[in-house]
Image (spheres, helix red, strand yellow):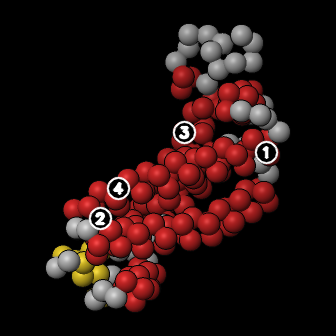
Amino acid sequence: MEGSLRMSRKPFFSHPVIRTFVVRFFLVFFAVELLLFLFPPLGYQEWIATQIGNLLHVPVNETFLLVNESWFEISAFCSGFTTLALFAGLVLGFNIPDWATKVRFLMEGGLLIFLLNFIRIYFVVWVGVNYSFAAAETFHILSWFALSGMILWMWMELMKKETRTMNAGELARYLVGNQSR
């Protein structure tokens, strides 16, 4: 099976392209998460809370919304930056595409991510208002996983188009085979 990922019985991480990708991905993700922890985007969090509070007619106090007598916080980690970090880690993890295309992907993808994240948070709070706080917490987790899955799918589709491959297996072989340096 020449050209495939199962060329030998070597450990998965022994392939230099895979190791480089994993290191780059986690460095980007860790850096964004650390920055969010150290310097939360409070103004943006308050803006999200205010907009959603106005749309759903719920009281707002800075980054908190009062949902059925419970405070729901728009934390730094719910602002969309964590999802952007996931996407950025994927885009920056490999040597392709070129840097101009990576920047374009990050800008266009970032706009889409922040829009989808705002819609996601709106529906999380909507569920809390119309059902229960516990239902909102459950929907919050499930919707983040769904958004993350959409981001992975979006990245894979962009990369398949960029590399002119047809499916995930072909894309994986292309990425691993054409990046050894």
Q: Which of marks 2 and 4 is nearer the N terminus?
A: 2
Q: Where is residue 79 in the image (x, y as percent from the top left)?
A: 44, 70
Q: Position of residue 76 (x, y in %)?
A: 39, 71
How many other residues sit within 10 Å of disc 1, few (<14), some (14-19) or many (≥20)? Answer: few
Residue corresponding to mark 1: 161
> Which dot, 2 or 4, sits closer to the camera?
2
C-alpha separation, residue under disc 3 versus residue under disc 1: 22 Å
The residue tagged with tag 4: helix, strand or loop? helix
Q: Which of marks 2 and 3 is nearer the N terminus?
A: 3
Q: Which of marks 4 and 3 is nearer the N terminus?
A: 3
In the image, farthest residue toward the front = 130
Q: Do the residues labelled 2 and 3 touch (CB within 8 Å)?
A: no
C-alpha separation, residue under disc 4 versus residue under disc 3: 24 Å
The answer to whether 173 appears left or right of 6 in the picture is right
Numbered label attached to residue 141: 4
> Which dot, 2 or 1, sits closer to the camera?
2
In the image, farthest residue toward the left = 69
The answer to whether 75 appears left or right of 16 in the picture is left
Residue corresponding to mark 2: 136
Q: Do the residues labelled 4 and 1 touch (CB within 8 Å)?
A: no
Q: Where is residue 141 in the image (x, y as percent from the top left)?
A: 35, 55
Q: Tell me the amino acid under the disc marked 4.
A: Ile
x 24%, y 82%: residue: 66
| Quarter of the figure that contains the C terminus | top right
The residue tagged with tag 2: helix, strand or loop? helix
